[in-house]
């Protein structure tokens, strides 16, 4: 799997995450969704091009107060998908 995660604190001091996770397949995605919905609020959905997730995540990449992390293999995963 590969991932991107942005972490920030909300105005009320609650830790808040935004992430995209790739390469996990539907079964693992559903297990992840079940875990987060049992232990807190989460929205876990399959990525669909054209629905705006790239703009949503881009917003968090440009926030100065957010802690942004990438998986070590993200560049490798993206290199096969970038159009030249």
Image (tube, helix red, strand yellow):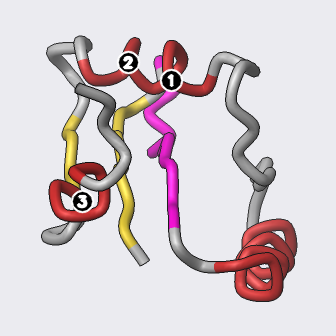
Rate crowding at label 2 as few (under 14), some (14 to 19) or many (20 or more) other CA atoms within 10 Å. few
Q: Report which quarter residue 83 is drawn in.
A: top left
Kindly identify which residue carries mark 2. Answer: 58
Residue located at (60% from left, 26% from top): 53
In whole angstroms, how far apart are the C-alphas of marks 3 and 2? 15 Å
Q: What is the secondary structure assignment of the residue under circle 1?
A: helix
Kindly check if marks 3 and 1 are in contact, taking CB atoms under 8 A apart as contact: no
Q: Nearer the viewer, mark 3 or mark 2?
A: 3
User: Left of 25 or right of it: where is 38?
Assistant: right
Q: Is residue 36 visible?
A: yes
In the image, residue 65 sits, relative to residue 33, either above or below, namely above
Which quarter of the rendered picture does the N terminus lie within? Answer: bottom left
Q: Earlier in the sequence, mark 3 or mark 1?
A: 1
In whole angstroms, how far apart are the C-alphas of marks 3 and 1? 15 Å
Residue located at (37% from left, 46% from top): 81
Q: Main secondary structure of the magenta part?
A: strand
Q: What is the secondary structure assignment of the residue under circle 3?
A: helix
Rate crowding at label 1 as few (under 14), some (14 to 19) or many (20 or more) other CA atoms within 10 Å. few
The numbered mark at residue 40 is: none
Kindly identify which residue carries mark 3. Answer: 74
Kindly check if marks 2 and 1 are in contact, taking CB atoms under 8 A apart as contact: yes
In whole angstroms, how far apart are the C-alphas of marks 2 and 1? 6 Å
Q: Earlier in the sequence, mark 3 or mark 2?
A: 2
Q: Nearer the viewer, residue 9 or 29?
A: 29
Residue located at (48% from left, 47% from top): 19
Magenta segment boundaries in residue numbering: 11-22
Where residue 21 sits in the image (x, y, percent)? 51, 60
């Amino acid at each position: 799997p590969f991932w991107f995660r942005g972490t920030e604190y909300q105005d009320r001091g609650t830790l808040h995450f935004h992430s995209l996770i790739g390469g996990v397949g539907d079964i693992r995605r559903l297990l992840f969704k079940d875990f987060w919905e049992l232990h807190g609020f989460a929205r876990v959905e399959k990525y669909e091009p054209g629905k705006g997730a790239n703009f949503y995540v881009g917003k968090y990449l440009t926030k100065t107060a957010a802690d942004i992390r990438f998986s070590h293999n993200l560049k490798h995963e993206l290199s096969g998908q970038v159009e030249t």
